[in-house]
Image (cartoon, grey):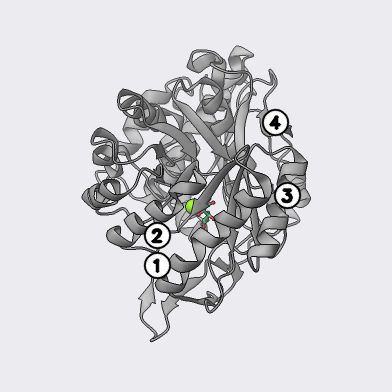
Amino acid sequence: MKITAARVIVTCPGRNFVTLKIETDQGVYGIGDATLNGREKAVVAYLEDHVVPLLIGRDASRIEDIWQLLYRGAYWRRGPITMSAISAVDVALWDIKGKAAGMPVYQLLGGASRDKVLVYGHANGADIEETADAVGRYIDLGYKAIRAQSGIPGVKGAYGVGRGDLYYEPADDALPTETLWNTSAYLDFAPKLFARIRDEYGMGVELLHDVHHRLTPIEAGRLGKSLEPYRLFWMEDCTPAENQEALRLVRQHTVTPLAIGEIFNSIHDCRQLISEQLIDYIRATIVHAGGITHLRQIAGLAALYQVRTGFHGATDLSPACMGAALNFDMWVPNFGIQEYMRHTPETDAVFPHSYHFDDGYLHLDDTPGIGVDIDEQLAAKYPYSPKQLPIARLEDGTMWNW
Ligand code: GCO
Ligand code: MG
């Protein structure tokens, strides 16, 4: 089966998505997500200028060889742009292989290890009361696991406070929104938030929290310790994790489970975190970490150390990524949880998909491939629109981590 064409489709049904579509001489095609939030055009150029010309005429069934060609052959390894582009090719080829075999991708990986995929949703509010109410609404919707984020008194634009309840979206048009950060206010506030939520809803729901790279290791240790009474499922991205060793200090101070990795793009970003058991969940995901082919290696390493998967699944990862992730989640032995931020109805219409939410889980059917398509005519109605993620500064103006 020969690759005859590969095209990059950019669409903005509320937010930008980059999709690679690969066509073959047998009429079977596949799609893969290549969206890198706020830096979308860099991946478009990488794909169009440097990857697509290499694909034409190749055997679409040789997924591993094409992965190695794009990784080794570029000479310049790793990095989010390269790895997002490789991922898009990889997923599109798995999609093709599944369609050609008449099987969902999880069957090709080794078959289902579970019947359905546990997900967590995002409850957020401007203050503790609003956030507690939002948690209640997610419980009513059937969610078994809920991430809670709240506005913090004295912190303008705290991370995670959305503009809508079900459809949180942080990116803004053109220039980045400037937010403020205050670590002391946050460290005092966060335990009060979770005390309030546990007080109202008891221990029967899993609670998660995203620190979004804001703390130093010793601060993260303090936060984890202060949240222990509320038995979090995980505390996410407590420090920027370029320095993997730093997590040792956090571990020495808390038994709150740790999840890291949504901005990682290679196994080398998390090798030490995993092999020293410095984290409990690895969040690297299909679109930014080299596709199904590379995630299989990361998950295999993680399994040796009882680290489980918890893939990133924010709205800036397209339904094509979600379809690939869910197929992976159905198979991977050391599955933990899958993040699920609902896409808007406009996005769902551009990407018809076979997965659906019911009673706290996402469910897949037997649709061959990744189970997600793109409606190109509809996609064309939503042209690219420049977007930027917010930035954060301390009160004296110092740049901080958003
Ligand atoms: C998450 C993430 C997102 C990111 C976003 C950036 O845990 O879902 O932290 O909210 O901020 O994906 O593009
Ligand atoms: Mg996160």
Q: Secondary structure at mark 2?
A: loop
Q: CA distance from mark 2 to mark 3?
A: 27 Å
Query: Badge 1: few (under 14), some or many (20 or more) residues near its Cα, within 10 Å?
Result: some
Q: Nearer the viewer, residue 37 or 51?
A: 37
Residue 340 numbered tag: none
Q: Nearer the viewer, residue 189 or 20?
A: 189
- Which marked residue is nearer to the observer: mark 2 or mark 3? 3
> Taking 112 as reference, is 350 above or below it?
below
Amino acid type at image mark 4: Tyr
Q: Secondary structure at mark 3?
A: helix
Q: CA distance from mark 4 to mark 2?
A: 31 Å
Query: Badge 2: few (under 14), some or many (20 or more) residues near its Cα, within 10 Å?
Result: some
| x and y percentages locating residue 303 in the rendered image | 36, 24
| x and y percentages locating residue 83 in the rendered image | 39, 44
> Taking 76 as reference, is 394 above or below it?
below
Q: Which residue is mark 1?
A: 401
- The numbered mark, 4 or 3, whose residue comes first in the sequence reads 3
> Taking 209 as reference, is 393 above or below it?
below
- The numbered mark, 4 or 2, whose residue comes first in the sequence reads 2
Q: CA distance from mark 1 to mark 2?
A: 6 Å
Residue sitting at 45 percent across and 52 percent down?
Answer: 227
Amino acid type at image mark 3: Gly
- The numbered mark, 1 or 2, whose residue comes first in the sequence reads 2
* Disc 4 residue lies near ligand 1 with CB under 8 A: no
Residue 136 numbered tag: 3
Query: CB under 8 Å between callouts 1 and 2?
Result: yes
| x and y percentages locating residue 402 in the rendered image | 45, 66
Q: Which residue is mark 2?
A: 213
Residue sitting at 67 percent across and 46 percent down?
Answer: 201
Amino acid type at image mark 1: Asn
